[in-house]
Image (cartoon, helix red, strand yellow):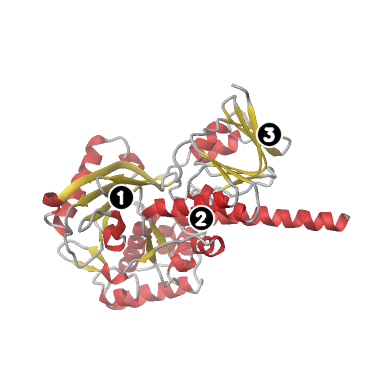
Amino acid sequence: MTAQTHHYDIVIVGGGLAGLSAAAYLANKGKKVAVLERGALGGRAVTLPIKGFHFNFGAHAIYGRDTSVLRTFEKELGIHINWRDFTPSKAKYDIGDEVTDVPANIQGLFRTKVLTGLDKVSFTFNILKTMLKLESGHPHLSIQKWLEKKEVNDEVREMMLTLASSNFFTKEPEKIPSDVFFRYYSRLFLTNKPVAYIGGGWQSLIQEFVRVIEANNGTIYTKTKIDRVSFEDNRITAVHAGEETTFTGDQFIMCIPPKELDKIMAGSRLEGLAKHYAQYDPTYVMVYDIGLKKRIESPYTYIYDKQNNMFITDISYYDTSCTPEGGQLLQATAYLRQEDMGKKEVLEAYKEKIEHMYDKHFPGWREELVVPRVSQRAVVQEIKWTMNQQAMPVFFPDYRNLFFAGDWCQGQGQLSELSFSSAMSVCEMIMQHQELELVSKHSIG
């Protein structure tokens, strides 16, 4: 086979949410863009149709959508997103013998039984300080150490850690860096739309990004696995898919997880840097979805088991397109520890606890079951927030035309929001660089 070389302004390795959103934005700005994806588009944001149900690999939830970077993409690119806003009053905590409101808003705070009396006042005061950015934490203090230093009482401390557990998808919220905690909640507490779903699931969003890329003459290559890179001085010059295909570019954006990045950087100047981030632990969960032929009505659409760190969401309440007519799709998610991985008996115990939770809150589900889908080791984010793991920068000054984006990179928010915000940061840097070059040329001229 004859070797082929393709040149683009921007070469993006990885066709997940970060890669596709960056490609759509830059193509819309007039850049000649290529997206290189080794498998199917979407990365972990995939919608899988089974027996008339549409399962998402991970809940297609957007947190703080009114301040989300995805809203910026929506407005600037003209993409259509069918927003389905979550109803906070339908969010509950399972506290054993009863359920109570999640203090997701003022109404929930006054109704919840998790806090009482003066503890509610203290918790509200801490929320207010966070909203006003009077508290910002410290990168060298975990949230647990910060709470101890501030002498926050046990009940309020437990409530803050419970919130962190549910939003960061972790059984170990006490290990979250306090600056990461406060940066996240200073934004989330101010939002009017704390949680929203996307009608049609991830696939509908992916299709919109692809539409914009193709409408602006961008090129998408699937089943294209990059196995190495070429450098010259402090610039990357090419990425290679086997011996037959080479992609050269002015700028490169790596939107692949650190463990994949480590493989393609082997033998290059970036090998040590990639290896450092490849050693990080991801955030693992067990996901147990069930598709039912008939709805089981419930007064809540989200129920969080505080003791077992797992929750159930009625996805189909918000996105009716994900089921056959009259059906229901429920998604249960259990948070896992790193040491749980590979232990069959431990994972089986989690599965049984989820089934017990379904029995408790959606009785009769077994009789209505059409299709279950269990992912025992699902990655919800490529970085787990601990004091030993910090997000990867989107740019290193030593490598002038190389950028990084994804939910393991520095940015705003968590989960998909990190992908979108890091992608936007990279796009803005590239466009600013272009503007500076134009000004420089004009000055010389």
Residue drawn at x 88%, y 55% is 445
Do the residues under discs 2 and 1 have CB atoms within 8 angstroms?
no
Residue where numbered disc 2 is placed:
420
Q: From where the camera sits, is residue 345 visible?
A: yes
Question: Which numbered circle lies on residue 351?
Answer: none
Disc 3 residue crowd, few under 14, some 14–19, many 20+, Cα 10 Å: some
Q: Is residue 268 above or below residue 257?
A: above
Do the residues under discs 2 and 3 have CB atoms within 8 angstroms?
no
Mark 2 residue element: helix
Question: Which numbered circle lies on residue 54?
Answer: 1
Residue drawn at x 30%, y 50% is 54
Residue 135 rendering spot, x and y as whole percentages: 49, 69
**Horizontal side of residue 307 vs 396, given as left or right:** left
Mark 3 residue element: strand
Badge 3 amino acid: Phe
Residue drawn at x 30%, y 67% is 155
Residue 334 rendering spot, x and y as whole percentages: 28, 50
**Horizontal side of residue 50 vs 281, given as left or right:** left
Badge 1 amino acid: His
Disc 1 residue crowd, few under 14, some 14–19, many 20+, Cα 10 Å: many
Question: Which numbered circle lies on residue 231?
Answer: 3
Badge 2 amino acid: Phe
Residue drawn at x 50%, y 64% is 71
Residue 191 rendering spot, x and y as whole percentages: 44, 71
